[in-house]
Image (cartoon, rainbow, N blue to C red):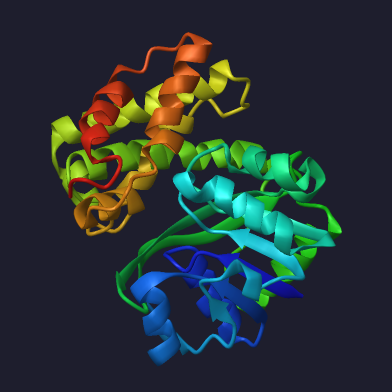
Amino acid sequence: MHIAIIGAGGIGGFLAARLLSVGQDVSILARGAHLEAIRKGGLRLIEPEGEILVHPPKISADPGDIGDADLVICAVKGPQMAQAAAIAGQWLKPDGVALPFQNGVGATEALAKVVGAHRALVGIAKIFCNITAPGVLTRYGGPGAFIFGDHHGSQDTDKVSEIRSALDLAGVDAPRVADVNVALWEKFLLFSAASSMTAGARCRFGQIREDPDMASAFHHLVAEAYAVALARGVALEQDSVERTVEILQNLPAEGRTSMAHDVELGKPLELDSVGGALLRMGRESGVPTPYTHAFVAALTPFKEGSGG
């Protein structure tokens, strides 16, 4: 199986390093100093359990250098999703599939507009991994799981099984769930709140836990996302808010979301596909989201990467 990965950041780079380390056929689309560093010295993945160094044989900044993919993994931020979908459409074999790992809930729909719903999978990445230097990725402790299925939420198709086998070989956790679409929203409850807090307050997970006011704000953010999900017909469990807040207690104290990382570096933010998307869905559903609104407003001046 030829796997083409768009993006070599915390998600795409992690998967590329793991897959290449066991001899999988992987092509990578990357850019800038990160690309040049990988070409010169390889891609280094630092994890609590140890390090991996791989030398990708096929890595380029030019989409025209890559094609004929059985699987295209779209590991980009929200603002780049439309472009990634167009590239996936060019690369995919007739029976190939595209799998997005993005922090919002609209990536599959964007892909389906280009490649068709039957070839657009649903993906959820539960991992805290960032580029910490050109050519270097660091995965912090905590979860490292990738959940995926078809647009109906099923994991029982042959393509999904084939992808799971490839990830299993690479030591990547790919758990089974009852409904991938529900799992997507369960992750969104956590990520939307954690992004708002760590990016908006420039803090780490440990600081949220330790400060009562910050912990309360986090709880309110999760509750708002939960209310929006229910209004949109997502079958979340009644204790989803409490379980999401409990997850925070077990995350690494020094961890933070990719949006917080981007704020610090002055990069553009995926605000429109995370907090901004939740605001829009709340308005459409008649669900008030005052805490989300406040954090989105605070982050808006940094949206285009002008701050940091």
Give the vertical position of 83 relative to 233 (above or below). below
In the image, is 281 to the left or to the right of 293? right
Q: Quadrant of residue 33?
A: bottom left
- Where is residue 150? Give x, y as percent: 75, 47
Residue at the spot 18% in from the left edge and 34% down from the top edge:
214
Q: Can see residue 47?
A: no
Q: Can see residue 272?
A: yes
Q: Nearer the viewer, residue 304 or 48?
A: 304
Task: Please count the marks in the image.
Answer: 0
In the image, is 280 to the left or to the right of 194? right
Residue at the spot 56% in from the left edge and 29% down from the top edge:
237
Q: Quadrant of the N terminus?
A: bottom right
Give the vertical position of 107 relative to 21 (above or below). above
- Where is residue 77? Give x, y as percent: 45, 50
Residue at the spot 71% in from the left edge and 70% down from the top edge:
67
Q: Quadrant of residue 69?
A: bottom right
- Where is residue 295? Give x, y as percent: 25, 30
In the image, is 106 to the left or to the right of 13? right
Residue at the spot 47% in from the left edge and 69% down from the top edge:
8
Give the vertical position of 31 relative to 301 (above or below). below
**Which residue appears farthest toward the top when viewing the image?**
286
In the image, is 79 to the left or to the right of 74? left
Q: Nearer the viewer, residue 86 or 248?
A: 86
Q: Quadrant of residue 141?
A: bottom left
Give the vertical position of 194 relative to 60 (above or below). above
- Where is residue 254? Give x, y as percent: 22, 59
